[in-house]
Structure formats: C-alpha cells, structure tokens
Image (cartoon, grey):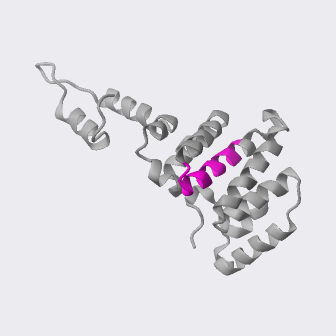
Amino acid sequence: MALQGGTDGFTGPLSFLNAPSEGPMHSRHVAETLLSMAGETQLESQSRALALAFLERHDEAIVAYEQAIHEMSRLGHEIAGDSLAMLHFKHGCELARVGRHTQALSALEKAIALDSTWAQEARQDDAWELLLGHPRFKDLTGEIDQLRLRIAASRTTTADGTPSSDCFHLYQGNHQGERSL
C-alpha cells in the first residue's frame, strides 16, 4: 500500500509512518495502535484522522477530519491557520477518494482560502486525479490562470496579425476540448 501521494507525507506525530525502513506492516500496526490511544484533544483528533486515512478507512477518516476541523476552528485562524488549511485539504482528499466530488472541491476551496500553497499540492496529489479535468478544480488550483499567463507571455503574431503557430500549439496541447480562455 502506498502512502497517499507525494504531498500526503506525514509530519508531526505521524511522521514515523513515512519510515520505509520499518515497512508497511509496522506502519499499519503503529497506526492501529495510535487509533486505539487517540483521545479528544485537537492534536489527537488530527492524528486520528490522519491514521484512518493512512489505513484507507475513508468514511471514518472523513468523520474524523470533520471533528478535527470543528475543534481547530474554535481556536481561530491566527492559532490554527496552517493546521486548519491542512485539515481541510486532507478532508477534501478523503471526500474525493469516495466520490463526493462537490464536497471535496468545497473542502479544497477552504484549504486554498487559508493557504494558497494547497492549490499546487492538489495538482500533484493522486487523491484529486479524477477531478483534474473538472472546471472548478482547474479554477481553484489556478491552472486556468497559469495557462492564460503562459499564453500571453508566448503570444506572438505573424506579419498579417494572426497568432503564430507556437501560440496555437501551446493552446492546443493544454486546452483540448475547452471552448475559450
């Protein structure tokens, strides 16, 4: 079993789950043990959600993330900002994995509103694979804005004012099937 993509590497209390030398069975055992010990503090509910996600217990992880988000939200953005953004992102990952795409995109939007770096993370995380072509996903992650900037930067015209072929190929390669910029 692979960890949940390159951007889902665990940090903090679950960083040991990344240790390849211990093997996946050890990590699985430790995650199960952590679940049995988890209490009700913000850090413990966050650890519980991460452990459930690692164990691919997605429906339980969704509920645990919702609880952790609720607890962290009470602390306020100034205190919980980075953690809260990460929790929304991970919550969205789990929602995407079980096919709840509208809710997943809403969670991603909240994560990006708190910390825009989650937009790039979403483009690289395999949990969002089924949503890569979704217009809202593209809008949230800035893919459309990035393409517009690249096209504008590369836009050249021929002597008669038509776009050069370089600009056309850039457009064709990245927007097959899209109607307009």
How many marks the image carries: the answer is: 0
Q: Is residue 146 above or below residue 103?
A: above
x, y percent for residue 86: 68, 47
Residue located at (43% from left, 42% from top): 134
**Is residue 52 inside the magenta stretch?**
no
Residue located at (63% from left, 66% from top): 56
x, y percent for residue 76: 82, 34
**Is residue 93 inside the magenta stretch?**
yes
Please state the extent of the stretch shown in magenta in the rendering. Answer: 85-100
130 displayed left or right of 95:
left
Residue located at (58% from left, 46% from top): 104
Which residue occupies the extreme left position in the image? 160
x, y percent for residue 173: 27, 43
122 displayed left or right of 71:
left
Q: Quadrant of the C terminus?
A: top left
Picture quadrant of residue 39: bottom right
Residue located at (55% from left, 57% from top): 97
Q: What predominant SS class does the magenta segment belong to?
A: helix
Q: Quadrant of the N terminus?
A: bottom right
Q: Is residue 170 above or below residue 96?
A: above
181 displayed left or right of 168:
right
Q: Is residue 99 above or below residue 71?
A: below
Picture quadrant of residue 12: bottom right
x, y percent for residue 38: 85, 63
Q: Is residue 148 above or below residue 59?
A: above
